[in-house]
Image (spheres, rainbow, N blue to C red):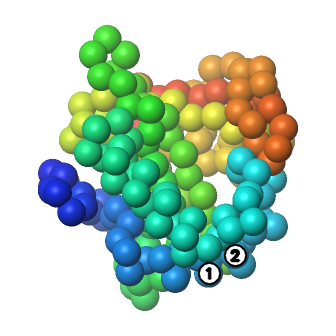
Amino acid sequence: MWLPFNRTAPRTTLVGPRILIRPPRRSDAAGWSELRATSRQFLEPWEPSWTGDAASVAAFRRRRRQMLAEWQARTGYGFLIFDRQDGALLGGISLTNVRRGVASAGSLGYWIGEPYARNGYMTEAVSCLLDFAFGELGLNRVEAACLPENIASRALLRKTGFVEEGLARAFLKINGRWQDHVTFAILRGDPRP
């Protein structure tokens, strides 16, 4: 179910068989901070360089403000992923760099806490986000990219219907270095599992 942005926060909720996806709330700060801190070694190789306070409540507040600004501008849609059964925060997923008009596309990003990795949660989350992107937002294309050695991410993208398109040289600055990325995309009309 998708509900429009209001002045305080977006009210969108996406639901999968085992997960619930919604925009971050102030009350999520402590759980986010704890999950990011305990998953730091697991996440660092795949993300931009972590600052000294990268897993702090202050960092959560900065990210949340940025997400809300993107929601309001309709250029990005950031979510947190929760277990429907026990309410545990599992990770995050976003659709950013949303372009309308002749491009009609956006970029997928995601992270999952180490305790929850390789349990199928992110497969559900990506499927829910694609429903949102193609259905509610009416986009034609969703793009994604990952490091060539990120076997789990490459498998996730293929499993959810993305097609590998090529290699982008020095595409993103990850863990302090400009690194090549394998690029993927899925179109609204592409088959999805």
Q: Residues within 10 Å of mark 1 (few under 14, many from 20)?
A: some
Q: Is residue 179 left or right of residue 136?
A: right
Residue 182 rendering spot, x and y as whole percentages? 71, 29
- Check the picture and name the quadrant holding the C terminus: top left
| Residue type at numbered disc 1 | Glu
- Check the picture and name the quadrant holding the N terminus: bottom left
Give above or below for 63 relative to 143: below
Q: Residue at x 37, y 75 (%)?
A: 26
Q: Considering the numbered disc 1 on the image, is that residue within a helix, a strand or a loop?
A: helix
Q: Is residue 88 left or right of residue 189?
A: right
Q: Which mark is residue 37?
A: 2
Q: Residue at x 69, y 75 (%)?
A: 37
Residue 129 rendering spot, x and y as whole percentages? 38, 48
Q: Is residue 189 visible?
A: no
Q: Considering the numbered disc 2 on the image, is that residue within a helix, a strand or a loop?
A: helix
Q: Which mark is residue 34?
A: 1
Give above or below for 188 relative to 166: below
Labels 2 & 1 near each other (Cβ < 8 A)? yes
Residue 39 rendering spot, x and y as whole percentages? 71, 72
Q: Residue at x 31, y 11 (%)?
A: 102
| Residue type at numbered disc 2 | Ala
